[in-house]
Image (cartoon, grey):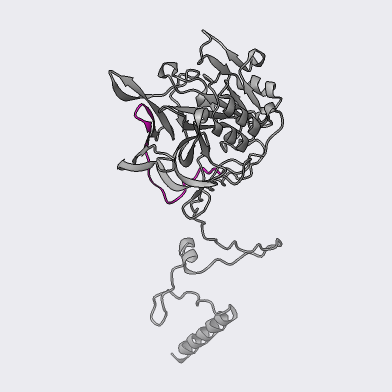
């Protein structure tokens, strides 16, 4: 019995030594779970290993690149549309200084403007010809309740303008201010002499056999049968050479400070009326003129015989000026240069702006300022100026609708 126990103890000792020599591995022949031995843990799967601890990086000979630092995503912001800069009072080449628009043919600006005197009566001569192509038009009272037009052309040519009529004193003043040439048909000798003296004989052209094809009489040869061609008139006047017409100011942006102005009715007399109605579709004012139907005054669209379209204008200005009464056939003179400043109402973009017109000197275009003395820009495009007496009275007859009654002086 003793021997058996000794051998058993030696066997156990030998087994322990072998286990130590094998690196402390689990004893051979021991079954996990036997008394005194903890159960072996299951070997982790690849998925569990990845979840339990980070993978060991394998050494590489390639240089490690730094990790990209995540950046915040930029949120686009709305970009404001640049506001077009005002045009004027000095103008870049190619810009018509009477409209603020780029000329289709810049060569047209290398000449003097043309001031053409156009009749408005009798009504039977309407519609007029070529007025829709003018850059700038003045309408003013002449005599016996009637008005006439002085239309300036620079950035556009018109093959036919008229009918032409005789001059008045104010024509010489306005033509000189715009450094233009003057086309007309005769006039009172006293008035004609003064007008030609103001603008010079080389810039004043009255119809005669030698003026055609620039200024021609046609049809039955009556007083309202004379018409002008602006391109031929340029050749007749030999007026090549750009003129200094700086002074006017234009902007596509509607200025602040206006009040609604969608309709303007100017009553020069009972039988002579001009009306302008704002069209938001066109972005312009359309012209109506009076007609007599069954003894009643009615307003009818004023069209252009040349284009067969209703006349329209980006701007309409009411200029209050001093009508100086003359003697005999002198009729009236309208003072701009002598007075230098007067009240003005500028209609543009369906709004009306109170301000003043300025005549800085005898050879500079009219300018417009607001009530605070700041430049009052016109909208780029054509401008019609309704010249009324200083004592004329404007009245707002309905929201945005204005009526001006002509009164002297």
Which quadrant of the figure contains the N terminus?
bottom left
Q: Is residue 263 magenta?
A: yes
Query: In front here: 291 or 278?
Result: 291
Does residue 194 appear left or right of residue 406 in this picture? right
Does residue 160 appear left or right of residue 293 in this picture? right
Residue 280, image x, y percentages: 39, 35
Residue 23, image x, y percentages: 58, 79
Query: In front here: 146 or 163?
Result: 146
Query: In front here: 243 or 142?
Result: 142
Q: Residue at x 55, y 61 (%)?
A: 70
Residue 352, image x, y percentages: 41, 44
Which quadrant of the figure contains the C terminus?
top left
Number of numbered markers: 0
Q: Is residue 262 magenta?
A: yes
Most extreme residue toward the front is: 328
**Where 125 falls versus 29 (above or below)?**
above
Q: Residue at x 68, y 62 (%)?
A: 60
Most extreme residue toward the bottom is: 2
State which quadrant residue 267 falls in: top left
**Where 326 falls versus 217 (above or below)?**
below
Residue 117, image x, y percentages: 54, 25
Q: Residue at x 52, y 24 (%)?
A: 118
Does residue 124 appear left or right of residue 215 in this picture? left
Please provide the residue range marked out in magenta. Answer: 249-274
């Amino acid at each position: 019995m003793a021997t058996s126990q000794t051998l058993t103890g030696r066997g156990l000792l030998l087994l322990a030594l072998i286990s130590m020599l094998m690196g402390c591995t689990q004893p051979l022949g021991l079954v996990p779970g036997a008394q005194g031995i903890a159960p072996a843990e299951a070997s982790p799967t690849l998925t569990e290993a990845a979840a339990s601890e980070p993978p060991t990086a394998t050494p590489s000979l390639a240089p490690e690149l730094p990790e990209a630092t995540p950046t915040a995503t930029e949120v686009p912001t709305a970009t404001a549309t640049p506001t077009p800069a005002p045009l004027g009072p000095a103008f870049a080449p190619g810009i018509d200084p009477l409209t603020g628009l780029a000329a289709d043919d810049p060569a047209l600006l290398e000449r003097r403007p043309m001031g053409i005197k156009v009749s408005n009566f009798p009504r039977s001569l309407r519609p007029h010809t070529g007025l829709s192509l003018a850059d700038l038009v003045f309408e003013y009272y002449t005599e016996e309740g009637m008005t006439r037009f002085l239309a300036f052309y620079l950035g556009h040519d018109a093959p036919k303008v008229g009918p032409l009529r005789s001059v008045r004193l104010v024509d010489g003043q306005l033509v000189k201010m715009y450094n233009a040439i003057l086309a007309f048909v005769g006039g009172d000798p006293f008035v004609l002499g003064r007008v030609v003296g103001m603008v010079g004989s080389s810039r004043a052209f009255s119809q005669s056999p030698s003026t055609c094809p620039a200024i021609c009489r046609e049809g039955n040869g009556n007083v309202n049968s004379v018409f002008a061609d602006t391109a031929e008139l340029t050749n007749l006047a030999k007026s090549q050479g750009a003129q200094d017409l700086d002074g006017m100011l234009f902007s596509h942006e509607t200025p602040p400070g206006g009040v609604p102005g969608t309709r303007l009715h100017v009553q020069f007399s009972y039988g002579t009326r001009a009306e302008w109605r704002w069209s938001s579709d066109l972005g312009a004012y359309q012209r109506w003129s009076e007609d007599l139907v069954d003894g009643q005054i009615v307003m009818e669209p004023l069209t252009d015989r040349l284009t067969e379209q209703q006349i329209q204008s980006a701007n309409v200005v009411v200029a209050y000026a001093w009508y100086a009464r003359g003697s005999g056939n002198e009729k009236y003179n309208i003072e701009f240069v002598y007075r230098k400043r007067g009240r003005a109402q500028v209609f543009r973009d369906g709004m009306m702006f109170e301000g003043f017109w300025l005549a800085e000197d005898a050879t500079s275009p009219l300018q417009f300022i607001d009530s605070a003395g700041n430049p009052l820009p016109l909208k780029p495009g054509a401008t019609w100026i309704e010249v009324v007496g200083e004592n004329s009275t404007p009245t707002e007859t309905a929201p945005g609708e204005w009526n001006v009654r002509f009164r002297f002086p």
